[in-house]
């Protein structure tokens, strides 16, 4: 009797468990379907928005071709810049590998940056040149092709010939396979429409050599893993803080990064663990980082600045000047900019981490310097135009056309000037502008004002923020 009751109890328990599992499976299935539907709706919305904004890009490009006044042209080009930016945002939300739509992304990016640069010309009452209008005409033609491809894709989407979730399935490894069920492979055709699009070539903010910029200071031949380890040993042994290495381990390579590197893990004899990224081309240290607790702050900010500068000099980086810094948990990160004959070159930037207990350098990041560092070529009249250094033959000349006193005439009359000099600043388009840099004060706020040394325009204004943890700019 007891045996029968036991069997009945177990059968009931198993039945309850099966029912529970089936119920859980149904719940999970419904949740998964709900998630898929939510994702599909999100992608659909992003695609519809992308299509609308690309349509607006095409319309504003058309309008820009017939605008006759700088005032109206500035408004049209500003709208074009905004719509192209928004189109890029929604394109990035689609479940498509970036390399598959690389040319489309590049096109929208170029429209955005180029329209912004032209709008600034219009704002300064300059009319567009025939070359400017020719470039806009070319961009408009491509925008019509892109709009046509997106309209076709909209039909495929609305007809149900594909769903976005299909593009996320792991078995669909090739993009062409992902869309093979779409008539005429609309995605692929969209890219082919741009097969001849190699970028606009013009002497302005967004030339092709800027889009595909190569690191200027990344010199040397390709190195293998063993050569990279030897260069790390040489780097860490230099200077007063030379370290004895116990072991170096290769943790992998970053091939698709802006700079291809070996990622190395270094153990030293005194127990330090250091992560180093070293470029495959030339064996340059791109980043170096070692973390440890810093429980006291003994050295001053001035001493830390000097420690960092001495460290850079020992490692082969000369003529570096501290600019701004941020202090956190006993470690200060200092930005150092290259100085060419008294001119602060902000694009050539290196960041250094210094421990405030003993002044040890715990980290360094050099990508800004590696990308931008070169000797600049200055022309024009005046003592300030003479650098005394030899610039590369292909270096673009920067002309000083106005004096410092003339530049001051374009400053706010309430600005109390605290310091002044020359500086090269980067632009949003990865170009550079030589400016007069004026540090000044209005009431209790400090500013940096940059006046173009060639034409006297006000290029940028930064608000200097002094915090307990550092000096920052906004």
Image: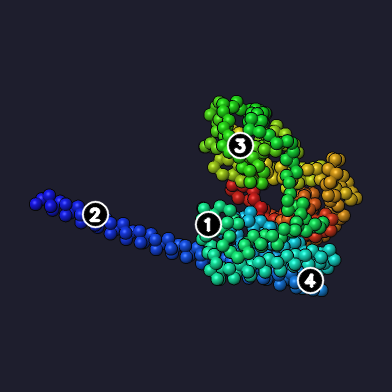
- For the residue labelled by badge 1, is the local secondary structure a helix, a strand or a loop? helix
Q: Where is mark 1, residue-wise?
A: 168
**Label number found at residue 276:** 3
- For the residue labelled by badge 3, is the local secondary structure a helix, a strand or a loop? strand
User: Residue 137 vs residue 311: left or right?
Assistant: right
How crowded pointer 3 is (Cα within 10 Å; few <14, some 14-19, many 20+) is rated as many
What is the spatial separation of the Cα atoms under label 4 and label 2, in whole angstroms?
76 Å
Q: Is residue 132 above or below residue 359?
A: below
Give the position of the C terminus as an image quadrant. Answer: bottom right
Label 1 with label 4: CB-CB less than 8 Å: no
Query: Which one is in front, 429 or 416?
Result: 429
Mark 3 and mark 4 lie on one chain; the one further toward the N terminus is 4
Residue 66 in picture, x, y percent from top left: 79, 73
- For the residue labelled by badge 4, is the local secondary structure a helix, a strand or a loop? loop
Q: Where is mark 2, residue-wise?
A: 14
Mark 3 and mark 2 lie on one chain; the one further toward the N terminus is 2
């Amino acid at each position: 009797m007891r045996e029968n009751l036991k069997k009945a109890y177990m059968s009931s328990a198993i039945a309850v468990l099966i029912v529970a599992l089936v119920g859980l499976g149904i719940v999970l299935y419904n949740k998964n379907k709900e998630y898929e539907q939510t994702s599909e709706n999100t992608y659909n919305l992003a695609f519809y928005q992308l299509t609308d904004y690309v349509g607006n890009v095409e319309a504003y490009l058309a309008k820009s071709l017939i605008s006759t006044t700088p005032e109206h042209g500035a408004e049209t080009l500003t709208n074009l810049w905004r719509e192209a930016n928004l189109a890029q945002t929604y394109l990035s939300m689609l479940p498509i590998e970036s390399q598959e739509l690389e040319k489309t992304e590049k096109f929208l990016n170029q429209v955005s940056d180029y329209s912004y640069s032209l709008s600034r010309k219009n704002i300064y009452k300059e009319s567009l040149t025939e070359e400017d209008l020719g470039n806009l005409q070319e961009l408009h033609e491509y925008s019509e092709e892109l709009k046509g491809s997106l309209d076709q894709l909209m039909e495929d989407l609305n007809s149900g010939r594909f769903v976005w979730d299909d593009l996320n399935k792991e078995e669909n490894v090739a993009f062409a396979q992902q869309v093979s069920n779409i008539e005429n492979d609309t995605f692929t055709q969209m890219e082919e429409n741009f097969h001849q699009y190699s970028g606009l070539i013009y002497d302005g903010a967004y030339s092709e050599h800027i889009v595909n910029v190569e690191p200027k200071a990344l010199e040397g031949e390709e190195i293998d893993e063993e050569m990279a380890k030897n260069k790390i040993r040489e780097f860490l042994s230099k200077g007063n803080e030379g370290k004895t290495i116990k072991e170096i381990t290769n943790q992998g390579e970053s091939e698709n990064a802006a700079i291809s590197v070996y990622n190395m893990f270094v153990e030293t004899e005194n127990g330090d663990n250091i992560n180093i990224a070293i470029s495959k081309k030339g064996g340059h240290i791109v980043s170096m980082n070692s973390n440890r607790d810093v429980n006291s702050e003994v050295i001053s900010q001035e001493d830390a600045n000097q420690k960092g500068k001495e460290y850079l000099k020992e490692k082969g980086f000369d003529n570096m000047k501290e600019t701004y810094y941020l202090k956190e948990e006993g470690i200060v990160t200092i930005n150092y900019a290259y100085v060419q004959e008294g001119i602060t070159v902000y694009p050539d930037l290196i960041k250094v981490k210094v421990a405030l207990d003993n002044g040890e350098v715990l980290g360094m990041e050099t990508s800004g310097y590696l990308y931008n560092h070169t000797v600049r070529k200055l022309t024009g009249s005046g003592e300030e135009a003479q650098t005394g250094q030899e610039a590369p033959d292909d270096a673009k000349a920067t002309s000083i056309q106005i004096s410092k006193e003339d530049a001051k005439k374009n400053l706010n009359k309430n600005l109390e000037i605290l310091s002044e000099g020359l500086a090269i600043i980067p632009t949003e388009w990865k170009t550079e502008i030589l400016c007069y840099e004026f540090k000044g004060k209005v009431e209790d706020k400090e500013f940096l004002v940059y006046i173009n040394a060639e034409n006297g325009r006000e290029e940028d204004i930064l608000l200097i923020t002094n915090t307990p943890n550092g000096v920052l700019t906004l």
